[in-house]
Image (cartoon, rainbow, N blue to C red):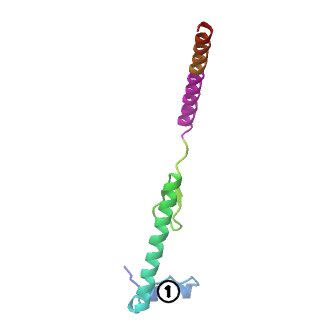
Amino acid sequence: MISLSVEETNKLRASLGLAPLKVESSNKNANGAGGEEDEAEKARKAEALAVAEAQAKKVGGTVIPGSNKNEVHIPPENISEKTLAEKMREKIRQRKLKREQASFKLHILIETRG
């Protein structure tokens, strides 16, 4: 088994005409400003996630875990539940109308006898 460091691998890739591998420099963490940038970036991401979660709650969805853009998943509407609710509303409306008609007939009947 052959083992190469990232620098050696990049030299080999360059000789083959390939793009070098991306390497995060450890100088950033050794430098004090780099740590502050990391903390600021983490705070920004946490704030963006909190905003996305609040927006997701408003629309009844959830934030997709691992999404770079804090995308929100909104579940599809259940058509059968929607039609059932419409049928129930119609039944209620019909019953209300019948009650009003019966009340009106009773009112007229009382007035004519009284």
Mark 1 surroundings: few (<14), some (14-19) or many (≥20) residues within 10 A? some
Q: Does the magenta segment cover residue 65?
A: no
Decide if residue 98 is on the left or right side of residue 5: right
Q: Is residue 64 above or below residue 18?
A: above
Q: Does the magenta segment cover residue 91?
A: yes
The residue where tag 1 is placed is 10
**Magenta stretch bounds:** 78-97
In the image, what residue occupies the spot 43% across and 82% down?
Answer: 38
Amino acid residing under circle 1: Asn
Q: Is residue 90 above or below residue 16?
A: above
Image location (x, y in percent) of residue 40: 45, 81
Image location (x, y in percent) of residue 13: 52, 84
In the image, what residue occupies the spot 55% across and 46% down?
Answer: 76
Q: Nearer the viewer, residue 56 or 9?
A: 56
User: Is residue 5 in view?
Assistant: no
In the image, what residue occupies the spot 55% across and 87% down?
Answer: 14
Image location (x, y in percent) of residue 99: 56, 20
Image location (x, y in percent) of residue 72: 52, 58
- Quarter of the picture containing the C terminus is top right
- Quarter of the picture containing the N terminus is bottom left
> Is most of the magenta stretch helix, strand or loop?
helix
Q: Helix, strand, or loop for circle 1?
A: helix
In this view, the residue farthest toward the front is: 114
Q: Nearer the viewer, residue 58 or 26?
A: 58
User: Is residue 109 in view?
Assistant: yes
